[in-house]
Image: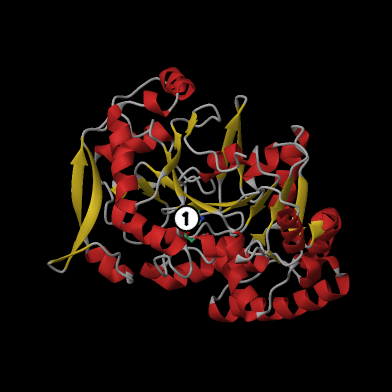
Amino acid sequence: MVVAAVVGAQWGDEGKGKIVDLLAEKADVTVRFNGGDNAGHTVKFQDKTYKLHQMPSGAFYPGKKVIIGCGCVVNPKTLLEEIGIISNDGYAPNLIIDSRAHVVLPYHIALDGMEESKKGSRAAGTTKKGIGPCYSDKAARFGIRFADMLDKKILEEKIHTMHEIKTKTIEQVYGQKFAQGEDDVFEAYSGYADELAKYVADGCAAVNDAVNAKKNVLLEGAQGALLGIDQGLYPYGTSSNPTSGGASTGSGLAPNKLNEVIGIVKAYVSRVGSGPLPTELMDGTAQKIRDKGGEYGTTTGRPRRIGWLDVVALKYAHETNGFTGLAFTRIDTFAGVSPVKFCVAYELDGKKTTRMPVSAEELARCKPIYEEMPGWKDLKPAEWRRICVRGYFAVPDEPKNYMKRVSEYLGVPIYIVSVGPGREDTIVIKDVFAK
Ligand code: IMP
């Protein structure tokens, strides 16, 4: 029995969806532990591409249990659409939505944009899916959980309180009007409750039962460690903990139940939204990578900012997450760039540091200090696939040396290498669920 968490080691979009889909084959249960439909996890197999936002990426193995954990905030409308799409393709999910998970309401979505405009230059560039306002209400204990939504009396009372506070805020603070009436919101959410009721249960109990029964459990993070509310670059991140700590609190499994924490490392960095990114590339290389890798936000379609790999940030992510293994992704996308650089230290106000500063203002003043290595040749997808069939030894020396160098810097072994979007474009060096 193994409990493995998959965590984005950078700013999200590292390719977690693909890795989770791959690992989920041998997991009995997959739990998504943070975030909501701000996430976009791309899963590609049998010539089909699915862009999942809330459904755990392990949903494509019929019969296996998938759980939306207590650490998530869920938009019931988009979840129902997602269930519909994958069910129509023959993947009706064996889904549990933890009754503790919070529900995203139309007020949250409306306020997300308004709060962002008010913040001016300190806006995070959110996905405008209502994630921050929903987590705010959760912390303030105004929130509506799935358990509350199923009880129509509680739902009505809670919407009544929330409607008054939110409509007044929208009108009096932001000078705008909230279009929906209280009854409209209640009717809509009462309908979602009826449709989703069959999935709502105690997710924490389910995942603990699975561990007690010696099953393999996969904990799937959304976003990336550096966007986390506690350890991320505040205020330019998201409102949840996309970390190994979040994997525990967001699933209901005690921290000492986690055996493996796999950090997903993209060969370069990308970021959507605002905030300093010391290694950002502003030249043609960024556009080349963006075009080649389709580096546009899965949820919002925004072009992703692109930069050289940042080992200082990765070391911080490792320090705060305790990676036991790394999965390198996008080795194929990064091919054709030579030489490749990666940042090993910053110069901050004339001093060299290998520690990521706490404040965004300081990070914005950091000048990256790079190491350089020869890049690698661009190969056709079929050539990468042939390498995958042969195994890690067949990977050309340049990408192997690059990954090895980064792995040595962190002191964390390489478990997986991904050289394309499909399941077959992968080399597994250590299979975490192997008997
Ligand atoms: P929010 O999560 O929508 O509140 O957005 C907060 C910040 O996190 C913004 O910079 C978003 O672009 C970023 N973000 C949210 N979800 C993702 C994701 O799945 N991948 C990458 N960035 C994300």
Between residue 329 and residue 81, name the one nearer to us: 329
- The quadrant of the picture occupied by the C terminus is top right
Q: Quarter-wise, where is residue 393 in the image? A: top left
Q: Look at the image and tell me whether residue 307 can be seen.
A: no
Residue found farthest to the left: 350
Residue 147 sits above or below residue 391 on the image: below
Q: From this view, report whether residue 409 is shown above or below residue 347.
A: above
Label 1 near ligand 1 (CB < 8 Å): yes
Q: Position of residue 126 (x, y in %)?
A: 49, 60
Q: Nearer the viewer, residue 170 or 145?
A: 145
Extreme-front residue of the structure: 435
| Towards the viewer: 57 or 214 | 214
Amino acid residing under circle 1 = Gly
* Residue 262 appears in the figure: yes
| Position of residue 117 in the picture relative to residue 379 (left or right) | right
Q: Which residue carries the number 1 mark? A: 224
Question: Crowding near pointer 1: few (<14 within 10 Å), some, many (20+)?
Answer: many
Q: Is residue 276 left or right of residue 221?
A: left
